[in-house]
Image (tube, grey):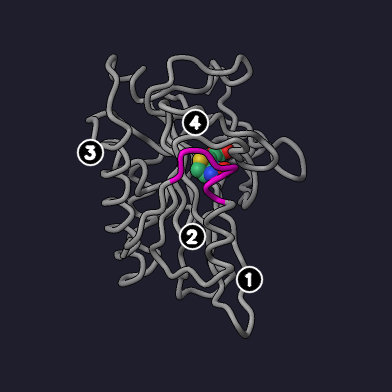
Amino acid sequence: MLHTIFRYSRITSTNDIARTMAENGASEGTVVVAETQSAGRGRPGKDWVSQPGTGLYLSVVLHPKAPLKDFWQMAFVMAVSAADSIREATGLNAELKWPNDVLINGRKVCGILIETLKGDEKRHAAVAAGIGVNVNNTDFPAEIARKATSISKELGATIEISNIEGSLLASINKWYTVYSDEGFTPIISRWRELDCTAGRNISVDTPDGLLEGTALGVDDNGSLVIERPDGTRVSIHTGETIWRADG
Ligand code: BTN
């Protein structure tokens, strides 16, 4: 389903270009790859370190057939694709942390940024699905150094970024086709197999404040279900998971 790759040496953000292309009618499966991004974006308001030669920076234009309210499912399709591709390309034990971080040995190796464009009478609704993978990074900015890793750090050897790209595109092709043909059920099942959060004591930074409890897993709506210390259960749709030292 992926069909055309546009390659750039330096752009602001592959998501910016993918969004502009989608606004101008780019079809599903258009891919944007950059060697470096001058304004790589992470989830809410964070930067994504995007130096040349260290990472894979890629975005895909999608036109899901699902209604707009279900477009959040794309984050799960991409997370499963990314984790499986890293496993296949490297043999490393890539796992998932809600909502959609890919971790190796508890540290983040890949992040996903889903941006939705509402349709109108002229244009189909679209998603710019951005994926950033730390491939050959040797060090990270101080504020993320303890939480981030790269494939080369975990492997103890550098690896061609193009290998990771090829494996990721093959995996997106596979999982997006599964999603289009069979719906969300196989995606969330695979996500649960890759989940490394379930059973741990965690804190979740939510728009309503910090919630603590034991992660029980992810429900069919993509929400994280936690059990609070008082035994009540809460489903969280938006937030960031924070490991606890006693987790
Ligand atoms: C996160 O914070 O976890 C999401 C990071 C997403 C980074 C990727 S790199 C390719 C694409 N372009 C961007 O500006 N961001 C995404």
- The magenta span reads 8-15
Q: Which mark is residue 200?
A: 4
Q: Are the residues at dot 4 and dot 3 in contact (C-beta closer than 8 Å)?
A: no
First along the sequence among labels 4 and 3: 3
Look at the image and say whether residue 174 sits in the magenta stretch: no
Inter-mark Cα distance, 4 to 3: 26 Å
Does 240 sit left or right of 171 as displayed? Answer: right
Place residue 117 in its image quadrant. bottom right
Which of the two marks, 2 or 1, is nearer to us in this view?
1
Q: Are the residues at dot 2 and dot 1 in contact (C-beta closer than 8 Å)?
A: no
Inter-mark Cα distance, 4 to 2: 24 Å
Which of the two marks, 4 or 2, is nearer to us in this view?
2
First along the sequence among labels 4 and 2: 2
Q: Which mark is residue 88?
A: 3
First along the sequence among labels 2 and 1: 2
| Residue at left offset 46%, top offset 64% | 62
Inter-mark Cα distance, 1 to 3: 34 Å
Residue 7 location (% of width, % of height): 41, 47
Does 17 sit left or right of 199 as displayed? Answer: right
Q: Are the residues at dot 1 and dot 3 in contact (C-beta closer than 8 Å)?
A: no
Q: Amino acid at mark 2?
A: Gln
Which of the two marks, 1 or 3, is nearer to us in this view?
1
The residue at which mark 1 appears reads as 118
| Residue at left offset 35%, top offset 41% | 83
Residue 169 location (% of width, % of height): 31, 50
